[in-house]
Image (cartoon, coloured by chain):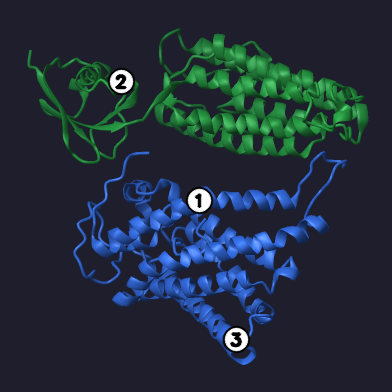
């Protein structure tokens, strides 16, 4: 799951038919539609489908190749600017806190409202995919945003004792840098004026940020385990009227385990995208 | 009689894989696939997808070369469908699993529940009834696979068996764990609820079977013909008046009956997931019926009368 959402295209990606400005190297993709570059750049398909994205995009969503209406463009531009601003505010707040207090303890508490607001607002990205103004698949966007919502609301918000863990700062930093890069990438793409360094940042920062974020998230969940076990929170036990049970502790263990297959897939998918966009490589994927 | 030339290119790389000359104009795609296998033995016909366009739909085995929109030199694009497995094998495996797994829990095989319950049985009648219903359901499915169904396709991709078995076996284990659990709570409304649920279950099982038989009779053995199904003298088939895929309607009905009978949330969730899947299939089937038959009865909905 692309927790760092470098892999998430959901944030109002470059409008389908428009190119993200002239790319510095000509891209000999076999795509037939103009601006496919930008689409490819911003519309990472589900990692498991890997390189099927290129052919898959064309086959799957011919409607999305239409030029975006004015309303959609205006909305998406506003949305991406707002999200860039929001995460910038978060970044600044975090830096100021650390400079004033010299410690990370209490940092989460001081920024939690802003974090929850902007991260939850990102649920809109699923709607963007549903109504087709962003070319990403709903499922991919859904998974990306859900994993963020999970971390924020079901872990850090709900399990107070772990809020001062170092691992929390780790993933917060990773998320913040990633989101600022991603949303400004989309903003500039929509405005048809993408500076190369933003594109460069988007396709290179993830190399470090993605593993860092994943590490932060996993360590945080791991730190939360003892509290979950002790309190039995979010769990249902037998016997009960509906003959069902749920153990949040084991659910967390399974969630942690699921990173093992998912993280490499998404990481390598981003690496492939990077090669395509930045180095103009034509990659022929094996049919799955 | 003019012969055709057929060149087969890889759909992804456009590499020329095979060149066939002197192909009969009335050759079918199936025959071309066989010829292709001769030069590339690792791709037997079920592995192959041939199309007129690299990103187009696959051509059918029965399509005849001269009826296709090609010149005398035809270019076909090849896609490797990957390892294949027969539908019958997949069905038998995915249905045998739940049958067997349910019984493991029912007979309280050791290590599943606490030791003091080893090899004991539940004191609730509904638990025994549920076991009979569940087992009957899957035995019925196995027998239908062997003797009733006539499949359009011979094979499906190999990875499907892992996906399907995980789904069926996983859900079966999850459901049966709770129904046969020593701490199982019987339905709130007691015998009334169970009787009602059993009635729903039995009616829907009979209905589902009737539809399977009706569909089988539409299609002669060994053929792939498609016809519009119509109600017959059997009252269970009268649902054809209102839906295109009453077999799916009855199937969902059976599971709803089972969920009410056991009052078990995992069963309800399984019914919901199953309902979502068969609705997608029913809508697809309904759409292809509409496309293929101009005189398709307009009153019919895909799966739920008047609604869906």
Instruction: Tell me, yes or no, whether dots 3 and 2 are on the same chain.
Output: no
Between the residue at mark 3 and the residue at mark 2, the CA separation in whole angstroms equals 66 Å
Please tell me whether mark 2 sits on a helix, a strand or a loop.
helix
Q: Nearer the viewer, mark 1 or mark 3?
A: 3
Label disc, if present, on residue A262 of the rendered structure: 1
Instruction: Tell me, yes or no, whether dots 1 and 3 are on the same chain.
Output: yes
Task: Name which residue lies at 50% across and 17% down.
Answer: B88
Task: Name which residue lies at 67% across and 53% down.
Answer: A252
Q: Which residue is mark 3?
A: A98
Q: Specify which label sits upstream in the sequence, 1 or 3.
A: 3
Task: Name which residue lies at 35% across and 30% down.
Answer: B81
> Mark 2 falls within which chain?
B
Give coordinates of residue A64: x percent, y percent: 37, 56
Q: Nearer the viewer, mark 1 or mark 2?
A: 1
Q: Which residue is mark 2?
A: B45
Give coordinates of residue B179: x percent, y percent: 80, 31
Dots 1 and 2: beta carbons under 8 Å? no
Position of residue B26 relative to residue B126, above or below, is above
Q: Nearer the viewer, mark 3 or mark 2?
A: 3
Q: Place residue B145 in its image quadrant.
A: top right
Give coordinates of residue B55: x percent, y percent: 28, 40
């Amino acid at each position: 799951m692309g927790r760092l959402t470098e892999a998430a295209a959901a944030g109002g990606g470059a409008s389908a038919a428009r190119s993200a400005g002239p790319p510095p190297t000509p891209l000999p993709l076999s795509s037939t539609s103009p601006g496919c570059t930008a689409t490819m750049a911003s519309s990472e398909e589900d990692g498991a489908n890997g390189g099927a994205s290129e052919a898959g995009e064309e086959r799957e969503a011919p409607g999305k190749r239409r030029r975006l209406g004015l309303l959609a463009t205006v909305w998406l531009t506003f949305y991406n600017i707002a999200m860039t601003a929001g995460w910038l505010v978060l970044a600044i707040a975090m830096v100021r806190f650390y400079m004033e207090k010299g410690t990370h303890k209490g940092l989460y508490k001081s920024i939690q409202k802003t974090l929850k607001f902007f991260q939850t607002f990102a649920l809109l990205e699923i709607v963007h995919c549903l109504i087709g103004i962003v070319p990403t698949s709903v499922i991919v966007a859904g998974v990306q945003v859900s994993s963020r919502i999970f971390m924020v609301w079901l872990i850090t918000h709900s399990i107070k004792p772990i809020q001062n863990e170092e691992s929390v700062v780790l993933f917060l930093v990773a998320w913040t840098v990633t989101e600022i890069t991603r949303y400004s990438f989309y903003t500039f793409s929509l405005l048809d004026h993408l500076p190369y360094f933003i594109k460069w940042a988007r396709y290179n920062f993830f190399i470090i940020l993605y593993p860092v974020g994943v590490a932060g998230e996993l360590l945080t969940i791991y730190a939360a385990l003892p509290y979950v076990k002790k309190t039995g929170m979010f769990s249902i036990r037998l016997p009960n009227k509906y003959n069902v049970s749920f153990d949040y502790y084991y659910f967390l263990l399974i969630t942690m385990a699921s990173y093992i297959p998912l993280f490499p897939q998404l990481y390598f998918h981003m690496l492939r995208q990077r090669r395509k966009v930045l180095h103009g490589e034509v990659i022929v994927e094996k049919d799955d | 009689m003019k012969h055709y030339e057929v060149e087969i290119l890889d759909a992804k790389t456009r590499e020329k894989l095979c060149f066939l000359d002197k192909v009969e104009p009335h050759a079918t795609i199936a025959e071309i696939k066989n010829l292709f296998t001769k030069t590339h033995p690792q791709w037997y016909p079920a592995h192959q997808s041939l199309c007129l366009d690299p990103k187009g739909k696959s051509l059918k085995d029965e399509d005849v070369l001269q009826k296709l929109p090609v010149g005398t030199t035809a270019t076909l694009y090849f896609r490797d469908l990957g390892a294949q497995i027969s539908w019958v094998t997949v069905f038998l495996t995915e249905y045998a699993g739940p049958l067997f797994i349910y019984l493991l829990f029912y007979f309280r095989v050791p290590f599943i529940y606490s030791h003091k319950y080893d090899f004991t049985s539940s004191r609730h009648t509904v638990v025994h009834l549920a076991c009979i219903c569940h087992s009957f359901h899957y035995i019925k499915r196995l027998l239908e696979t062997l003797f009733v169904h006539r499949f359009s396709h011979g094979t499906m991709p190999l990875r499907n068996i892992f996906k399907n078995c995980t789904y069926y076996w996983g859900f079966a284990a999850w459901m049966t764990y709770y129904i046969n659990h020593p701490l199982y709570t019987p339905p709130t409304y007691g015998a009334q609820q169970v009787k009602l649920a059993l009635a729903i279950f039995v009616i829907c099982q009979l209905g589902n079977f009737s539809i399977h038989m009706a569909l089988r009779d539409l299609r002669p053995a060994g053929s792939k013909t498609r016809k519009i199904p119509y109600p017959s003298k059997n009252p269970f088939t009268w649902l054809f008046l209102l839906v295109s895929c009453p077999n799916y309607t009855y199937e969902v009905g059976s599971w709803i009956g089972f969920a009410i009978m056991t009052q078990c949330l995992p069963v309800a969730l399984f019914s919901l997931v199953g309902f979502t899947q068969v609705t997608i299939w029913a809508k697809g089937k309904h759409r292809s019926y509409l496309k293929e038959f101009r005189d398709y009865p307009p009153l019919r909905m895909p799966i739920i009368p008047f609604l869906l």
